[in-house]
Image (cartoon, helix red, strand yellow):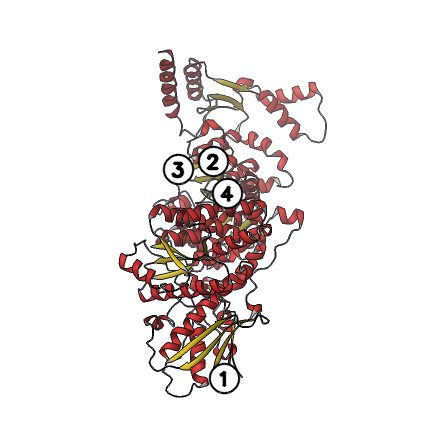
C-alpha cells in the first residue's frame, strides 16, 4: 500500500509539473512602480507557501562590477568602490534597485540590474571586438531561427553576444534523450518543446531578451507571419531538416530580400545566400536546380536524398557522415551530429550573421571551417563519379546479326554471326574474357587472361562459368544454322589459354532448341517490383531447362528463407565493399557515362543497375575508397548491402546452380546450365539478376582461407552455414552461381558487347 501511495503521489506531482512545461517567459518586476511591487509581493507570498522559492540576490556585486567597468583607467580601492556604488544607486534602496525576475519553470527569483545597465555590463567583454556603436546596431536586429539543433547553438550564441533586438524561434519538435548529445538541456527538460527549452535558456542569460516562439514549426500558413510580423526580419537561419520548409523559406526570403544562412554541422559548412543583395539569386546557389516546394511534400525519403545531397555537396561531406549515410534507417535512425560540430555551427552562424548585419561581409557562397582539415591538413583523394543527368542519357542497344541456315559452304559471315551470339553470353562484370580463332572447320575459344584478373574470380572459376555460357550459345545457334558441333574442352595441356575447340560441320537435319530464340534477348534485369510467387509451371520449366547437364538447379521461394538470404547476401556485399582490392575492381567495372560505355563496350553500364537519382548520388560516394576506408575503420557499414537486400525483398525466388566437382570441365557445365536457366527465364518473361559474388567468396574462403582476415573469414563461415542450411545443400555440393528471379518490367538498358571484329580472328 505504501508503494502504491508513493506512486500515486509521484504521478500527481508529475501531472502538476507538466501543466507548466510549456511556460517560457519570465515575469519581471520593477519595484519602483507601486502596482508591480504589489504583484511582486503577492507572488512571493504565494510561491513561498510551497517552500520552493529560490532567491538569488547579487545586485550589490553587479552594481560594483558596473562601476568598475565604467572606470577602467584606475583601480578603485574597496572603500572607494563602495562609495562609487552608493553614488550610482542615487538614494534608491538596494533591494528596490533594478528588477526582480521570476522564472516560473524553476521557481527562481533573481535580482538584476536595470535593462540598459544589465546589457551594458553583460556585453562589456565584447568590446572592442564589437564596438559600442556596433553593439547598438546589433541590438536592433530582427532575426529568425528555424530548427533548433544547430539552431539552438546559434540562438544561444547570438544571445551571449547580444546580437539581436528581436529573435524568433521555430521548431515543431520536443526534446528527446537522443538530442542531448548536442543540445544544451537538462534531463528535467525531456519532452519539453525545443522552442520553450531554448527560450528559457536565453531568458536565463538575458531576462530582457525580446523573443517570440513558433512551437508548431514553420508551415505554409505561418511563414509570412514569421518573416514579416512587426517588420521584416533582417536575417534568417535555416537549420531545419524539412526540404519543403527549406525551399519555402528561401522563396519567401528572396521575395522579401532577406538573407539566409545555413550551417550543416559537418566540416563547418555554411551557406550564405544574400537575397538582400541578389534578389534573383537561385536557391541553394543553383546546385539543386529548380525546386517547387509544393511537389516536395509528396516525395519519399529516397526521392529526397539526391536533392539533399546536392544541397549539401554530397562528395564534400566528411568521411564519417558519408560512412554513416549508408546506415541511416539500418543501424542509425537518422543523420549523426556531434556537440562539437553543433557548437562550431552556432559560432560560424553567429560570426557570419554579425558581419553581414554590420556590413562587413557582402559575399554569397559556400564556405568551410573544417577543423580536421585546418588542423591536420588532410586532403581527400579524387574519385570517379556521375550525375543524374548523365545517367538519364538514352543508351545504345546491343544488336546481333540474324541467324540464317548454312546452305552450302561455311562463310566468314556465318562464323561472325556464330561468334556474335556466343559473345552475348554473360561474364563476371561483363569482362568478356574471350577471343575466337577460326581455322579450317574449327572454332577455338581462347581465354584472354588480361580481361579476367578479378580477385573474386578465384582459380578462374567465374571465367569458366562464362565460357560455359558462351559454349552453350554456340551450340544453340549452330544448331539453328544447320551446323553440328563437336566440342573438346581444354584440348591442349600445354596451352592454358585454349579453353575449347569446336569442330563445325553441316548437318541439315538438325532440330534447333527453342531456347535459341532467347540468346540475343537475354540480359541482366535488375528492375524491382512487388514480390510475386513463381507458378508451378514456371518452376517446372526452369527445372527442366537443365536436364541432361551435369549441374543442378535449386530454388528457394518461401518468405522466411528469402529473409535469411536477404541478410546473408547483404552482409556479403558489405565484405566486398570494405575490401580495398574488391572495391577498386568493382568500381573499375562500372561505366558511369554513356561515353564510357560506348567507348569500352564492356563492363557494367550504371544505367543497367536501374539506378535512381538517389542511387547515383550514393554510388558517387561509394566510389571513393577513402570514404569506405572510414566506414571500415569505425566498424560500420551495415547499410552497404541495402541494394542487394532490396533486390532480394522483391524476388520471386533466389536460385543457385551447384556442382559436385570443381574440375574445370564441371565449371564449364555449370555455366552451360546457368545459361539455359537464364534463357528459359527470359522465355517465361522473368527478370534474372546475378548475385554471384558470394559464391566465389565461399570458394576462395574454402580453398584459400589465408587470403581473408580472421574476422572476415569468421563472417564468411557463418554466412556459408546459413546459406547451405537454407538451400539444404548436401556435403560436397558447391554453389557456383546465385541469382534472383522476379516478375518485373523490361530493363531500362542492356550492357553492350565488344565488336565481333575485336574478338574474332581468321587464320
| Disc on the earlier residue, 1 or 4 | 4
Where does label 4 land, which residue?
336
SS at circle 4: loop
SS at circle 3: loop
Of the residues tagged 1 and 4, which is closer to the observer?
1
Q: CA distance from mark 3 to mark 2?
A: 20 Å
Of the residues tagged 1 and 2, which is closer to the observer?
1
In the picture shown, does residue 393 fall above or below 92?
below
Q: CA distance from mark 4 to mark 2?
A: 10 Å
Where does label 2 land, which residue?
178
Q: Residues within 10 Å of mark 2 (few under 14, many from 20)?
A: few
In the picture shown, does residue 187 fall above or below 706?
above
Question: What residue is drawn where x is 66% and y is 19%?
Answer: 83
Where does label 3 land, which residue?
215
Where does label 1 land, which residue?
440
Q: Farthest bottom residue?
A: 408
- Quadrant assignment, res 691: bottom left
Of the residues tagged 3 and 1, which is closer to the observer?
1
Query: Residue 485, percent across and down?
Result: 42, 76
| Disc on the earlier residue, 3 or 2 | 2
Image quadrant for the C terminus?
A: bottom right
Can you see residue 208? Answer: no
Q: CA distance from mark 1 to mark 4?
A: 67 Å
Amino acid at each position: 500500500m505504501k508503494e502504491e501511495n508513493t506512486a500515486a503521489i509521484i504521478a500527481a506531482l508529475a501531472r502538476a509539473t507538466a501543466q507548466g512545461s510549456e511556460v517560457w517567459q519570465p515575469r519581471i518586476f520593477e519595484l519602483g512602480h507601486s502596482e508591480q511591487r504589489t504583484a511582486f509581493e503577492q507572488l512571493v507570498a504565494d510561491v513561498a507557501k510551497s517552500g520552493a522559492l529560490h532567491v538569488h540576490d547579487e545586485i550589490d556585486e553587479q552594481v560594483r562590477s558596473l562601476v568598475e567597468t565604467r572606470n577602467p583607467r584606475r583601480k578603485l580601492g574597496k572603500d572607494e568602490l563602495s562609495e562609487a556604488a552608493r553614488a550610482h544607486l542615487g538614494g534608491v534602496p538596494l533591494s528596490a534597485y533594478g528588477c526582480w525576475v521570476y522564472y516560473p519553470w524553476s521557481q527562481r527569483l533573481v535580482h538584476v540590474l536595470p535593462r540598459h545597465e544589465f546589457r551594458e555590463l553583460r556585453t562589456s567583454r565584447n568590446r572592442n571586438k564589437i564596438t559600442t556603436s556596433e553593439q547598438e546596431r546589433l541590438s536592433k536586429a530582427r532575426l529568425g531561427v528555424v530548427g533548433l539543433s544547430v539552431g539552438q547553438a546559434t540562438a544561444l550564441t547570438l544571445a551571449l553576444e547580444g546580437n539581436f533586438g528581436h529573435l524568433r524561434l521555430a521548431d515543431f519538435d520536443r526534446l528527446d534523450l537522443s538530442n542531448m548529445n548536442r543540445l544544451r538541456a537538462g534531463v528535467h527538460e525531456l519532452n519539453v518543446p525545443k522552442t520553450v527549452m531554448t527560450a528559457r535558456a536565453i531568458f536565463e542569460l538575458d531576462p530582457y531578451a525580446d523573443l517570440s516562439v513558433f512551437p508548431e514549426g514553420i508551415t505554409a500558413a505561418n511563414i509570412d507571419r514569421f518573416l514579416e510580423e512587426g517588420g521584416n526580419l533582417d536575417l534568417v537561419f535555416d537549420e531545419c531538416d524539412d526540404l519543403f520548409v527549406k525551399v519555402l523559406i528561401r522563396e519567401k526570403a528572396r521575395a522579401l530580400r532577406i538573407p539566409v544562412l545555413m550551417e550543416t554541422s559537418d566540416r563547418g559548412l555554411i551557406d550564405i545566400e544574400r537575397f538582400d543583395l541578389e534578389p534573383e539569386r537561385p536557391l541553394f546557389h543553383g546546385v539543386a536546380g529548380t525546386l517547387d516546394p509544393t511537389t516536395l511534400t509528396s516525395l519519399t525519403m529516397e526521392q529526397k536524398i539526391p536533392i539533399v545531397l546536392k544541397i549539401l555537396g554530397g562528395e564534400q561531406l566528411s568521411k564519417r557522415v558519408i560512412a554513416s549515410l549508408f546506415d541511416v534507417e539500418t543501424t542509425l535512425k537518422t543523420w549523426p551530429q556531434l556537440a562539437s560540430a553543433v557548437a562550431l555551427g552556432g559560432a560560424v552562424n553567429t560570426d557570419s550573421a554579425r558581419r553581414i548585419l554590420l556590413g562587413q561581409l557582402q559575399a554569397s557562397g559556400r564556405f568551410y571551417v573544417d577543423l580536421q582539415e585546418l588542423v591536420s591538413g588532410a586532403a581527400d583523394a579524387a574519385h570517379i563519379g556521375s550525375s543524374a543527368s548523365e545517367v538519364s542519357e538514352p543508351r545504345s542497344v546491343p544488336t546481333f546479326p540474324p541467324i540464317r541456315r548454312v546452305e552450302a559452304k561455311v562463310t566468314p559471315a556465318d562464323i561472325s554471326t556464330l561468334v556474335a551470339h556466343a559473345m552475348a553470353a554473360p561474364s563476371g562484370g561483363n569482362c568478356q574474357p574471350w577471343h575466337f580463332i577460326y581455322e579450317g572447320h574449327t572454332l577455338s575459344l581462347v581465354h584472354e587472361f588480361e580481361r579476367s584478373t578479378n580477385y573474386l574470380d578465384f582459380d578462374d572459376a567465374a571465367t569458366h562459368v562464362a565460357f560455359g555460357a558462351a559454349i552453350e550459345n554456340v551450340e544453340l545457334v549452330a544448331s539453328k544454322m544447320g551446323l553440328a558441333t563437336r566440342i573438346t574442352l581444354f584440348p591442349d595441356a600445354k596451352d592454358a589459354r585454349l579453353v575449347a575447340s569446336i569442330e563445325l560441320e553441316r548437318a541439315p537435319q538438325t532440330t534447333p532448341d527453342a531456347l535459341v530464340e532467347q540468346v540475343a534477348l537475354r540480359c541482366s534485369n535488375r528492375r524491382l517490383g512487388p514480390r510475386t510467387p513463381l507458378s508451378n509451371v514456371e518452376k517446372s520449366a526452369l527445372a527442366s531447362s537443365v536436364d541432361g547437364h551435369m549441374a543442378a538447379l535449386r530454388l528457394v521461394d518461401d518468405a522466411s528463407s528469402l529473409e535469411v538470404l536477404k541478410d546473408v547476401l547483404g552482409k556479403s556485399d558489405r565484405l566486398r565493399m570494405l575490401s580495398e582490392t574488391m572495391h577498386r575492381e568493382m568500381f573499375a567495372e562500372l561505366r558511369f557515362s554513356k561515353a564510357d560505355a560506348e567507348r569500352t563496350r564492356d563492363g557494367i553500364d550504371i544505367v543497367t543497375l536501374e539506378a535512381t537519382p538517389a542511387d547515383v548520388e550514393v554510388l558517387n560516394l561509394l566510389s571513393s575508397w577513402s570514404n569506405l576506408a572510414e566506414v571500415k575503420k569505425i566498424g560500420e557499414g551495415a547499410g552497404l548491402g541495402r541494394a542487394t537486400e532490396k533486390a532480394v525483398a522483391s524476388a520471386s525466388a533466389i536460385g543457385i546452380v551447384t556442382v559436385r566437382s570443381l574440375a574445370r570441365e564441371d565449371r564449364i557445365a555449370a555455366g552451360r546450365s546457368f545459361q539455359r536457366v537464364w534463357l528459359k527465364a527470359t522465355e517465361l518473361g522473368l527478370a534474372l539478376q546475378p548475385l554471384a559474388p558470394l559464391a566465389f567468396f565461399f570458394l576462395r574462403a574454402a580453398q584459400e582461407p589465408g587470403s581473408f582476415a580472421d574476422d572476415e573469414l569468421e563472417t564468411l563461415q557463418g554466412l556459408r552455414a546459413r546459406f547451405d542450411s537454407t538451400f539444404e545443400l548436401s556435403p560436397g555440393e558447391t554453389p557456383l552461381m546465385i541469382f534472383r528471379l522476379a516478375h518485373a518490367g523490361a530493363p531500362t538498358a542492356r550492357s553492350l558487347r565488344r565488336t565481333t571484329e575485336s574478338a574474332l580472328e581468321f587464320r
